[in-house]
Amino acid sequence: MQPRINIAIKAARAAAEYIVHSQEKLLFDKEQGQDADQVYQVVCSGAERAIVYHLEKAYPGDTITTRLQGSVQKGEEGEWIIDAIQGQPLFTRGLTGHVITMSYVVAGKVEHALVLNPHTKDEFYASKGRGAYLNNTRIRTSTARTLEKATVAAQFPVTDRTAPYLSGQLAIFSEIAEKGARVVMQDAPALMLANAAAGRLDAAWGIKLQEWEMQASLFIAKEAGCLFANFDGSPNIENGDVLCANARLFKVLLPILNKHLS
């Protein structure tokens, strides 16, 4: 395991412990009439500080950027990009499935990445050229060849960005269901993509994702043998549309997504 991944895991574990403890308090605060979004901001900021504390000590020469606080340390080496609680709706309702994501970027390229689920303790991580791992075990993507009996993951349109794609998404669900596939919904894009990397899911796609929602997981997925691209097959995913799957299933799903979502 690479030193930066070691430190990232240590930092994320500290944040995860804080998040789980705080989520229990959040449910009580909601019962007392406190605004859940405000409590989320407080907890997420605290989790970010827990992560930053470890990174600042270990790597004073790195830049550190968090989702809520922005740039908290300027450096001349690489940059840490941190999302302490991805999956806010799940967190604020006391549900599991939200994750911590961390990426280490040098010259615009990810070199290390971590996705950690605070409740299940699952730790997905990868370093450039060294493969991908889940809880210290090497992972590879699914070997599914067809949609028959495949399990795939997607978002269900619930935001202003994804609402225009509702009819297309429903058409996809109908088409792949007829081919024998099962669809699950995961509110944190990073987790569904990481599960595709680990072969727990056979494929996953996201619509209009932000870079921080997919950066760490797609790096892990690539190291695990996944392909990913825009719905038109382009490697440019700056618009946030992305399909991630093993090579065989990628070729099956891409034309379907292109037909209904492009």
Image: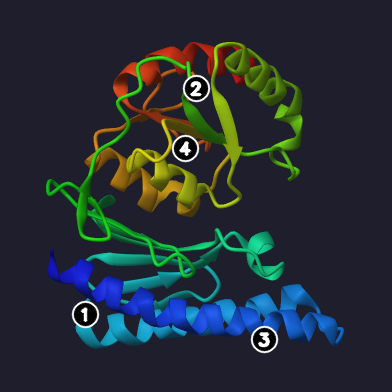
Q: Mark 1 or mark 3: which is in front?
A: 3
Q: State which mark lies toward you, 4 or 2.
A: 2
The mark that comes first in sequence, 3 or 2, is: 3
On the question of residue 153 being in view, the answer is yes
* Mark 1 / mark 3, whichever is N-terminal: 3
Q: Give the distance between the C-alpha atoms of the residues marked 2 and 1, in whole angstroms.
A: 38 Å
Which mark, by number, is residue 68?
A: none
Residue 25's tag is: 3
At x 46%, y 50%, the residue is: 190
Is label 3 in a helix, a strand or a loop? helix
Q: Position of residue 144 (x, y in %)?
A: 35, 22
* In-front residue for pair 213/90: 90
Which residue matches tag 4?
Answer: 238
**Residue of label 2:** 231
Distance, label 4 to label 2, CA atoms, is 12 Å
Question: In which quadrant is the C terminus drawn?
Answer: top right
Per the image, label 1 sits on a secondary structure element best described as loop
Q: What is the CA distance from the residue labelled 1 to the residue labelled 4?
A: 29 Å
Bin the neighbour count of mark 2 within 10 Å (Cα to Cα): few under 14, some 14-19, many 20 and up.
Answer: many
Q: Is residue 159 left or right of residue 252?
A: right
- Residue 175, percent across and down? 63, 13
Residue found at the very far right of the displayed protein: 33
Q: Position of residue 212 (x, y in %)?
A: 47, 54
Gap in angstroms between the C-alphas marked 4 and 3: 37 Å
Dots 2 and 1: beta carbons under 8 Å? no
Q: Quadrant of residue 170?
A: top right
Would you say the residues marked 3 and 2 are in contact, meaning their CB atoms lie under 8 Å apart? no
